[in-house]
Amino acid sequence: MDNPVIVGAGITGLLTAYLYGGPVTLVDMGKGRTNSHNSLWTVIPNLCGDLRGECESSMKYYGIMCEKFKVHCSLKAVIRVPPRGGETLDSQEVGKLEPLLRGHDGELVGEGLFIQGDDFLNALMERIDGKFVRARVVGLLREEGVVSGVKTDRGRIWGSHVILTLGHDPLNLLGNFGINVRPLKGHVVEAGKLGMRNILMLEDRLGVEGPESALLNGDSQESSDPSVNNSQVERTVQVFKKYLRVTLEVREVRVGFRAVSPDGRPLLMRPLSNVAIATGFRFGWALAPHLARETLKVLGLPQRVNL
Ligand SMILES: Cc1cc2nc3c(=O)[nH]c(=O)nc-3n(C[C@H](O)[C@H](O)[C@H](O)COP(=O)(O)OP(=O)(O)OC[C@H]3O[C@@H](n4cnc5c(N)ncnc54)[C@H](O)[C@@H]3O)c2cc1C
């Protein structure tokens, strides 16, 4: 039986392993939370550009998986204030949908899904048939001209296929294939619950609320520096305080990275017969179910778990 090595245990790698449904070796160099934990965990098809259809299917698949895994997911309206020219809502309509925003005109950006991402990643981990290795992958292992696994700082790992779901590729492994992925840094501000019902886009910031906390974000700057930039955090907090007129208790600030390909489109490639690369789209959660399915397809591997 095939035994692929999947490098990168973020949402893309874990979903690929889950849908494959057979034995895999997952390799990730991260300790504890991975980059995919530091996200707002929303799928907003109207922000996916020409991949809107793929993001709509993602919403459907997450819905099915959330029910199966008993993980919280909720469908919400996406409201932008001030409006930017889409379907406008007068202040009364805004107030009905989102009482905290009473008095503001807005725009309905469509529907979005919020996934309780921490729980979802844990649920995937528990369901994957395979072993997990914490190591830095430094190259491909080639034997007699064929890729037979990966080289890591802890030794070699053999596998029938190698799937590189490396996110922003911090060790520049994709450079070996002439691919450069840009890291866009952002902060997730986790705050006590504010009473937001929907996904709110306030000026250039975005917020959503799960069962236990509110998650706020919006900044995005090209950088691979993992330290917190307090001025960005402060701006996020000020914007939400200004529009919602609430007190806001910051519980934690996390730094995460989006991976962006040179043309902003997802990278789904098979540079060698048994090697695939999947990354590069700034809304990685929104596209992961689609990318995971296509990655298996491109390698000719079965998808044993059907959604
Ligand atoms: C603040 C913020 C908010 C966001 N909100 C949203 C949102 O609401 N919706 C949305 O769709 N997207 C959102 N994103 C983007 C989304 O979080 C990412 O696109 C997504 O998590 C990428 O998942 P991934 O599995 O492709 O990559 P990652 O989660 O980056 O996983 C890649 C993994 O590979 C490992 N790795 C890399 N190189 C190596 C190596 N050489 N050896 C071993 N391991 C390696 C890393 O440790 C990492 O764990 C947000 C991002 C940020 C920063």
Image (cartoon, rainbow, N blue to C red):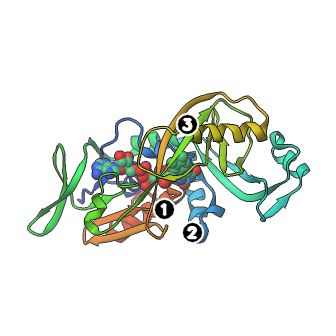
Lateral position of residue 185 relative to residue 232, left or right:
left
- Outermost residue on the left side: it is 144
Labels 1 & 2 near each other (Cβ < 8 A): yes
Residue at 49% x, 59% y: name it.
Answer: 289
Q: Find disc 3 in the rendering and name its residue.
A: 230
Residue 44 is situated, as x and y percent measured from the top left of the image, at: 63, 57
Q: Is mark 1 within 8 Å of ligand 1?
A: yes
User: In the picture provided, is 125 more to the left or to the right than 255?
Assistant: left
**Amino acid type for the residue under numbered disc 1:** Phe
Dot in front, 3 or 2:
3
Q: Examine the rendered structure and indicate whether residue 62 appears above or below residue 262.
A: above
How dense is the environment of label 2, judged by Cα within 10 Å: few (below 14), some, or many (20 and up)?
some
**Where in the figure is residue 165, as x and y percent of width and height?**
36, 56
Specify the quadrant of the image occupied by residue 294: bottom left
Against 47, residue 212 (above or below) is above
- Using the image, tell me which numbered label, if any, was put on residue 51: 2
- Residue 82 versus residue 157: which sits nearer the camera? 82
Amino acid at dot 2: Leu
Q: Secondary structure at mark 3?
A: helix
Q: Residue 42, how many percent across, how many down?
A: 60, 50
